[in-house]
Image (tube, grey):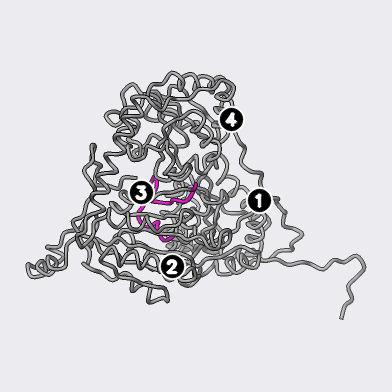
Amino acid sequence: MAKETPGEMKMDIITGAQIISEALRAQNVRYMFGVVGVPVIEVAMAAQAAGIKYVGMRNEQAACYAASAVGYLTGRPGVCLVVSGPGLIHALGGMANANMNCWPVIVIGGSSDQNQEIMGAFQEFPQVEACRLYSKFSARPSSLEAIPSVIEKAVRSSIYGRPGACYIDIPGDMVNGKVDRSKVREVSCCLPPPVTMAEPQSVSQAVSVLKQSKRPLLIIGKGAAYSRAETNIRDLVDLCGLPFLPTPMGKGVLPDTHPMCVAAARSRALQHADVILLLGARLNWILHFGLPPRFHPDVKIIQVDLCAEELGNNVKPSVALLGDVNAVVKQLLESFRKDPWKYPFDTEWWEILKDKIRSNERASQELALQASVPMNYYTVFYRVRELLPHNCIIVSEGANTMDIGRTILNNYLPRHRLDAGTFGTMGVGLGFAIAAAAVAKEQIPQQRVICVEGDSAFGFSGMEVETICRYSLPIIIIVVNNNGIYSGLDEDTWKELGKMGELPNVAPPVSLLPNAHYEQVMSAFGGSGYFVRTPEELQAALQESLTDCEKPALINVMIDPYSDRKHQDFPWLTRSNL
């Protein structure tokens, strides 16, 4: 047996899977979600060995939703790990959703071996090219040694500028390929995203416009939540006395119960405001493009955004403030502290807003107090609101379920509401809930995640209930069941339809099976399932679910299939009002 010669060094062999996982950990990536198979099983195992939490999902789309939600909640991208071909294609919806929401996420897709390219390999697909449409960065490392550099660039690209999705393609022969560790270049963690500030002259101009306003309004978007701007925004609102309106995921940046919140007078506030300070929100379909008749034709917009290309979309701003929302609000605060100004609380504008708030709240309460069974949406949400802890994370999706629930279920803390978002994506609910619960379980173990789903929305990713139970995640799912999409049919009508002909020919396209027992899905995997019809049954089930912090639960709430929202001054389109 040959002896080791003096000076000869023992090689430290490392696999591609280990390089990937250690590079991710070096970039402070902590969570990975995926559906494993050939060729990425070893990547998931190596990730766990490197200290990354791996959550195995039941569908790649839900896995990508979860990974992107982690990016929003923590400011650091989660990873979605998928197999080649169809596995990656299933994840494209999550990538598109992340890009539209401006959330950072890294998708790592296995692909066919390099020496089989263009030969018709198993699940061969032009993955790098396909992902370019849905991501900020899409690449395949040229070698094992190059993997850490590619991962660093992907993570950096996902969080710098406007956050979004990035894709890394890993051929199967790279996953199990081996190389001497000394040949792999170590890449340190990328620096935090640069914080940009607005031009001082523009800040002064914005302050001047606000001080001249007769009917000011502050709109808080999810960009403000992502920027962690809650402290400075609270100080600005309190210092200047500004009425504010949160967008759906801007809820909680300031508590919904804050005296300056005018969410209950949303339409009136948008229609009549003469100056709007727009913080991290886009004038897209969610805000009616900033155009009449939903906005005043002469409204002056002060637009704050970190993306220069966003400034002036649909409406030319009176003042454009390019920069990080938190930093720009701090600049505004400094100006107002040097030269104080506070909008009076006894103005006609405040009276208009308060009158509309009282009117809308009365209408909602009248519907909530209706004693009829089956229940309506308002009865359900008012009863739920009475029991929810203030620090719970609310995830919501559906049509009326999400829209009405948003107006009633309060948020008190930033980044504590997740919903269908800018892309209006159905099917995000359980993936988002799993992500929120995974983060909460590590940071605040007793925090609950409440996932409020329409019955149609639940169907998109219902098998993720098994994932929830497998990991004992502190999630309570409330399915608001109206037997359909937007509206359904009662059981007797459904039976009569069956007598009229084949159901595919006569059943309304929006209808689902009446009185479906979705709670049994939860029970099948060991969680607690409840089927409720009355307000008393609902509150008893929710109270029991909240008390048991170790066991996931699903409460299937039967409501009137014909229940609808209260009358609107400006009725929404039938698509989801986000």
Q: Nearer the viewer, mark 1 or mark 3?
A: 3
Q: Magenta span covers which residues? A: 413-432
**Cα distance, mark 3 to mark 4?**
32 Å
Q: Nearer the viewer, residue 117 or 176?
A: 176
| Image mark for residue 58 | 2
Q: Nearer the viewer, mark 2 or mark 1?
A: 2
Q: Give percent across and percent down for residue 94.
A: 44, 54
Q: Which tag, 3 or 2, sits closer to the chain's start?
A: 2
Residue on which the image places disc 1: 149
Q: Residue at x 57, y 31 (%)?
A: 330
Image depth: mark 2 or mark 4 in front: 4
Identify the residue position indicated by label 3 in the image. Answer: 406
Asked where in the image residue 456 lies, by quadrant, the reply is bottom left
Disc 4 residue type (three-letter): Met
How many marks do you count on the picture? 4
Mark closer to the observer (3, 4): 3
